[in-house]
Image (spheres, grey):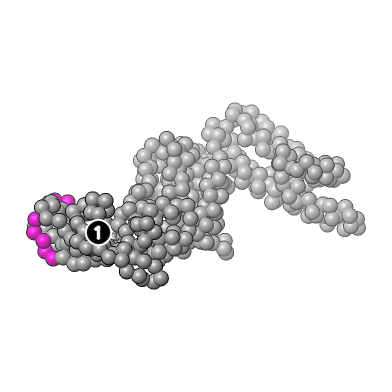
């Protein structure tokens, strides 16, 4: 059984079965074998002298659906360099109460289900399963490799209810998560740039983001050679909130005397915000009739599509020309929400035009944010930020 069990340096002295907690347990007693070279867990050097020995109960993988408990004589070696230290074993971590193969099994299961379910499957306390998975992720992931990073994408995601957010930083070239931190203020994202260091910060060429001023200011402070690139999705979402929604509400208020027409305008929010190609076939006629009957909604709807064209240009000169034409049409529309939007968007124009040179976006980050929601939902939420952020990094290790 000893070679089959894989407990190097130890042999089975006896074993028995015993009922416990409504299930049968296989209890195996392991004793140190004679003539085996033993190494100190501190320095890794061979040590002959034994300081003391203590029997420890260690969980191992089940055998034929029977839970396995090892009773191991754990040795402390009298190391002349480190003092009394535990023996180094390749099948058991220092101070661990589960074997490495059981820990790997728990970690693999935690990757596809919740910690509680993984714990129930192996008959462990959920805190034990979480600690095993946490140590496994720390050991396998290690610190992020930040060398050679030239492009970044930053975005926020909701971590808890009550407008509590975290920031995720991604390498869009290798599609990997570099860093996750709670918050979205300048002070809260600064640790990433401190981790990156001045030399690597100077190598950053472009950073894609939404129009978060805190992100913008931190990038400009720490990455002097980087261009800020504003993402299409967030600009269009801002247009939807500040222009389309506002004009729709104004038009609904204007039609107070016409109940049926007012109801049609009030209930058309999602129809107006959708891209034309995503409108269901049965709703397309409704949209066409709405736009034909309301000039203001037609104007803002068409200008939304034209605004998105700015991100299709690869020539900055042509994109600037298109912006000027769009701005002229928007200001001539006579719609006050549209005029306000133009004045607010114009200071961000350099970051929009930077897309011509650096065709980046936060669409990768948005996809990662959706996966983060799945991870959070699968675990019914996380109370431990460090563990949650490790799970996110493990889900996006990168390619290439």
Label 1 environment density (alpha carbons within 10 Å; few <14, some 14–19, many ≥20): some
Q: Residue at x 45, y 43 (%)?
A: 176
332 relative to 178 in the view: left or right: right
* Rendered-image quadrant of the N terminus: bottom left
Q: Is residue 89 magenta?
A: no
Residue 184 seen from this side: no
- Which region is colored magenta? 43-52
Q: Residue at x 73, y 39 (%)?
A: 276
Q: Residue at x 19, y 56 (%)?
A: 10
Q: Is residue 49 magenta?
A: yes
The image quadrant that residue 48 belongs to is bottom left
Residue 241 seen from this side: yes
Q: Which residue is mark 1?
A: 94
x then y, percent, for residue 267: 79, 54
x then y, percent, for residue 291: 82, 43
Closer to us: 67 or 182 = 67
x then y, percent, for residue 169: 47, 47
Q: Residue at x 63, y 32 (%)?
A: 312
- Looking at the image, is 368 positioned above or below residue 28? above
* Rendered-image quadrant of the C terminus: top left
């Amino acid at each position: 059984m000893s070679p089959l069990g894989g407990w190097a340096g130890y042999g089975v002295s006896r074993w028995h079965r015993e009922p416990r907690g409504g299930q049968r347990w296989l209890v195996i007693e392991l004793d140190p074998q004679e003539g085996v070279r033993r190494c100190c867990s501190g320095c890794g050097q061979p040590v002959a002298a034994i300081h003391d020995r203590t029997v420890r109960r260690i969980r191992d993988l089940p055998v034929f659906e029977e839970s396995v408990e090892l009773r191991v004589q754990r040795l402390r070696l009298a190391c002349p360099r480190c003092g009394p230290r535990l023996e180094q074993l390749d099948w058991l971590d220092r101070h661990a109460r589960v074997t490495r193969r059981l820990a790997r099994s728990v970690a693999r299961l935690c990757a596809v289900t919740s910690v509680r379910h993984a714990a129930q499957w192996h008959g462990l306390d959920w805190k034990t399963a979480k600690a095993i998975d946490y140590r496994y992720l720390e050991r396998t992931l290690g610190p992020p490799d930040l060398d050679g990073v030239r492009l970044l994408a930053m975005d926020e995601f909701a971590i808890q209810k009550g407008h509590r957010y975290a920031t995720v930083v991604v390498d869009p070239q290798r599609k990997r998560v570099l860093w996750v931190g709670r918050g979205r203020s300048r002070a809260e994202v600064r640790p990433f740039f401190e981790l990156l260091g001045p030399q690597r910060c100077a190598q950053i060429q472009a950073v894609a983001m939404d129009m978060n001023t805190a992100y913008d200011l931190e990038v400009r402070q720490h990455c002097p050679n980087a261009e800020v690139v504003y993402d299409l999705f967030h600009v269009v979402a801002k247009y939807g909130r500040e222009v389309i929604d506002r004009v729709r509400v104004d038009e609904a208020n204007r039609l107070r005397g016409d109940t049926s027409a007012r109801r049609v305008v009030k209930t058309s929010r999602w129809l107006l915000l959708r891209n034309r190609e995503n409108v269901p076939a049965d709703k397309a006629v409704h949209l066409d009739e709405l736009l034909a009957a309301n000039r203001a909604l037609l104007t803002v709807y068409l200008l939304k599509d034209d605004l998105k064209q700015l991100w299709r240009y690869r020539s900055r000169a042509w994109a600037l020309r298109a912006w000027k034409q769009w701005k002229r049409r928007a200001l001539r529309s006579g719609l006050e929400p549209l005029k306000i939007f133009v004045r607010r968007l114009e200071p961000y124009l350099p970051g929009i035009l930077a897309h011509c040179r650096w065709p980046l976006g936060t669409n990768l980050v948005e996809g990662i944010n959706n996966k983060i929601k799945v991870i959070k939902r699968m675990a019914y939420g996380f109370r431990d930020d460090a563990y949650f952020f490790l799970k996110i990094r493990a889900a996006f290790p990168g390619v290439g």
